[in-house]
Image: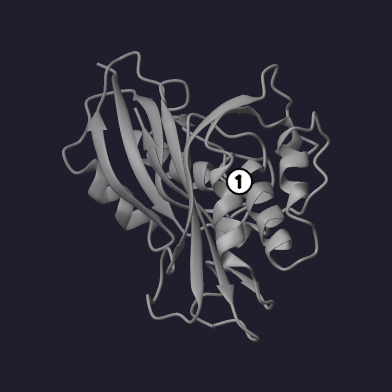
Amino acid sequence: MTQTIKGIVRYDGTDFMGWQRQSHGRTVQGEIENVLSRIADEPVTIQGAGRTDAGVHALGQVFSCVWPKDVPPRLCHALNRMLMPEVQLLSLVPAEESFNARFAARSKHYGYAIQLGASPDPFAARYAWHVPYALDLPLMQALAATVVGEHDFAGFESTGSQRREHTVRRIFSATLEPGAIVGPQLAANCWHFHYHGDGFLYHMVRNLTGTLVEIGRGRFPAEFFAECLHSPGPFKGHCAPAQGLFLKEVQY
């Protein structure tokens, strides 16, 4: 008999071309599907909660799939042995037949790490954006808080996306806090943004973060952030690089 299963996975996205399966290039979805298909001895397709881009990491990506037979008791263990070290299954459990990791998600938590200082810390370089400028951190904190609530975020969506009909999203919290997201906690001068919302547009977190950093260093005036927030698009700010972004958690 078939069984719908739900998996929670973390991965280092540095050497992947993103989550979504592609015809050319190594992806997280492709790696997991290949291993599941080998174990099942037939094709298995998974549905992720979100499509992280090339170089983006995850601490709590969620996927679902229909397992074509009885679930082996040590399936999670077998997957981890075959996927490690870049991909790790945290859990793999039975789910309701109708469960779909993408469409059932109620909110997502994203984090974005930055590392300040004249030189990049070698233990933070893969997991944080090195920003070699003095930043007005209190100003960045205050501006980040202005996105809390329901807004049309079309002005923070990158071009090239599969444009959704609706670009309104609700942000529950947006904060800037000291410390790294992963890696050595003593990595010098690390800070991270945390965003919690009911959904995010294409590159929205990277665009919010990049624009806040550019305002913090004085490249854009503080008023520019509100201009972007109330703009119908296209995005005119700065997109932060991929390596600092983490999908931290998906809530259902």
- Estimate the x, y position of residue 230 in percent, counting from the top left: 74, 32
- Estimate the x, y position of residue 1 in percent, counting from the top left: 24, 16
According to the picture, the residue beneath numbered tag 1 turns out to be 205
Q: Nearer the viewer, residue 230 or 8?
A: 230
Q: From the viewer's perspective, is residue 169 above or below residue 15?
A: above
- Estimate the x, y position of residue 121 in percent, counting from the top left: 54, 82
Looking at the picture, which amino acid does disc 1 mark? Answer: Val
Residue drawn at (49%, 72%) of the image: 190
Neighbor class of circle 1 (other Cα within 10 Å; few <14, some 14-19, many 20+) is many
Quadrant where the C terminus is found in the figure: top left
Q: How many marks?
A: 1
Whether residue 14 is visible to the viewer of this picture, yes or no, is no
Residue drawn at (65%, 86%) of the image: 118
Q: Nearer the viewer, residue 121 or 9?
A: 121
SS class, disc 1: helix
Report whether 143 appears left or right of 63.
right
Residue, far top:
98
Whether residue 119 is visible to the viewer of this picture, yes or no, is yes
Residue, far left:
73
- Estimate the x, y position of residue 13 in percent, counting from the top left: 53, 57
Report whether 64 appears left or right of 3.
right
Residue 166: which quarter of the image? Answer: top right
Q: From the viewer's perspective, is residue 149 above or below residue 60?
A: above
